[in-house]
Amino acid sequence: MTVSLPDAEATARLGAAIAPLLRPGEALLLYGPLGMGKSTLARGLIRALTTPDEDVPSPTFTLVQFYESDPPVAHFDLYRLTRPEEAAEIGLDEALDEGCAVIEWPERLGDDPGHWLGPDRLAVVISERDGGRGATFFAAGAWEERLKELHV
């Protein structure tokens, strides 16, 4: 499934649409080049789970931000990781034990992100498309069926 993302607002709305479908123990994986809108999508999702005015900075330098919500959500930016094991060191396991995770740059987890994540995850690849941007979805586990509930 692929959707068009003509602007930042559409990208944030996509995050908000995914939010109610995310369950504890699950990860949302955000792929795409720098500046493509991964943080904007994450911000939309987190604000849908918390409050519309929640301060949601990009965790580029802190690597992870935790938010009290239902379910609790952790926002990871793995861009600066040099080894997949570092994800566990910054709390990925605990985040998935207690809630869900939104992960930018999941490719830093190595060739098999499933090794570090549970079986239920949704990958979103944001790329340039038709003069704008588009998001393509890849579902694993429970998301294979749940993706049908996503209305964007």
Image: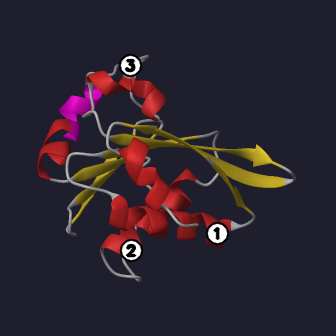
Residue 67 horizontal side relative to residue 38, left or right: left
Q: Secondary structure at mark 1?
A: helix
Q: Which one is nearer the viewer's eye here, 25 or 142?
A: 142
Residue labelled with disc 1: 10
Residue labelled with disc 3: 112
**Quick one: label 2, few (<14), some, or many (20+) residues within 10 Å?**
many
Above or below residue 57? Residue 120 is above
Please report the bounds of the magenta region as a residue range.
Answer: 86-92
Residue at image location 46% in from the left, 69% down from the top: 16
- Circle on res. 48: 2
Residue at image location 42% in from the left, 42% down from the top: 144
Above or below residue 22? Residue 95 is above
Q: Amino acid at mark 3?
A: Asp
Say whether marks 2 and 1 touch (CB < 8 Å): no
Instruction: Check residue 91 for magenta coloring.
Output: yes
Residue 141, percent across and down? Answer: 33, 37
Q: Amino acid at mark 2?
A: Ala
**Quick one: label 1, few (<14), some, or many (20+) residues within 10 Å?**
some
Q: How many marks?
A: 3
- Residue 42: in sight, yes or no? no
Q: Secondary structure at mark 2?
A: helix
Instruction: Check residue 88 for magenta coloring.
Output: yes
